[in-house]
Amino acid sequence: MEWTEVNIYTASEGIELLCAKLMDIGIKGFVIQDAGDFNEFLENKDGKWDYIDEDLMGLSDCETRITVYLPSNSQGADMLLSIRAMLSELKEADTDGLYGRLEAELSSIREEDWANNWKQYFKPVKIGEKLVIKPSWEEYENDGSRIILEIDPASSFGTGQHHTTRLCLELLEKSLNSGDRILDMGCGSGILSIGAMLLGAESAVAVDIEQNAAETAMENAVKNHISPEKYETFYGNILTDEKLADRIDAKYDVIAANIVADVLIAMKEHFLRYIKNDGTLIVSGIIEERMHEVIDALEGVGFRDPEINVKEGWAAVKLAAPL
């Protein structure tokens, strides 16, 4: 298998947080270079080191970074999109620059080649009983048995290849009723809300922390012949932007959120604010080890009757609105 090396530049203060978020994305192994740790070692070494190689001494003034290796396939491509979305979210919240520059750089292939190279990994994929996700650059001969959802993720997460998206779409297919209104939190490419519209939802509101994601979601909605009058997009952080939280304030039949465990837990009160009395909440992007932590947090504010969908270490959960 071929691998792509990704170097994520941060500061010493950002290492623990970034490693936790990378684990939420599904990345379990890291190589960490931190000048602070090395300088602490130099100050506290016990005298048994007679010689330290000059190359090693270079660590004393290196820029702190976390290196991860992603498989050069569709899973790795989606992971890279997730890393970039996560870094963008952290950078927006880190107004004091505590966590360094929060940028990811690829070293195994030219950065400019990635935008086109990753497309080779995304092919049409059938999801559930009704949908087929087709990248905009791929051909697909439909025998009429499935609804085609055409997607171009650009730099946003959401191609249908990753288990988190597929699990969420499967639950959406089972949960939607004709005429439902859906709220898509952390919309990425818009794949969940667009899929819901094609499955019979009446209208959708899609929200992402990144402006580019909101724009991409709208472009994808238009590609799928969804009227802008029925599909609205917003960008910003509803956890810190009360004006945005108020703009999308309504009661929704279905809320879908494919994010990561920590953000899902932080948004529990917002889910409660926006859900109809008989509504459905579907959350995904959760590594299996943290599934019950997320469920406990949501049940703590009244959500109930969790239905779990798990595959290869990833979980999506459907919950009913509080009584």
Image (spheres, rainbow, N blue to C red):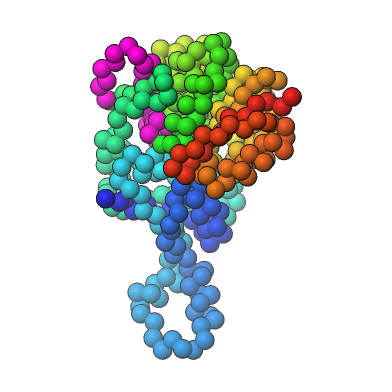
**Residue shown at the point (41%, 43%) measured from the top left:** 79
- x then y, percent, for residue 133: 36, 24
Residue 98 percent coordinates (x, y)? 57, 55
The quarter in which the C terminus is drawn is top right
Query: Which picture quadrant has residue 260?
Result: top right
**Magenta stretch: includes residue 140:** yes
Residue 43 in view: yes
- The one nearer the camera, 35 or 225, is 225
Whether residue 86 is visible here, answered yes or no, is no
Image point (41%, 36%), residue name: 162
Q: Quadrant of residue 219?
A: top left
Left of 301 or right of it: where is 235? left
User: Is residue 240 shown above or below 110?
Assistant: above
Q: Whole-percent x and y of residue 309?
A: 51, 34
Whether residue 41 is situated above or below residue 35 in the rendered picture: below
Q: Is residue 98 above or below residue 111?
A: below
Residue 283 relative to residue 128: left or right: right
Residue closer to the observer: 312 or 277: 312
Q: Is residue 128 left or right of residue 96?
A: left
x%, y% of residue 233?
Answer: 52, 23
Could you tell me what secondary structure mostly forms the magenta stretch? loop
Rendered residue at 52%/21% (across/down): 174
Per the rendered image, the range of residues in magenta is 138-161
Number of numbered tags placed on the structure image: 0
The one nearer the camera, 3 or 96, is 3
Magenta segment includes 14: no
Residue name at image x 51 percent, y 83 percent: 45
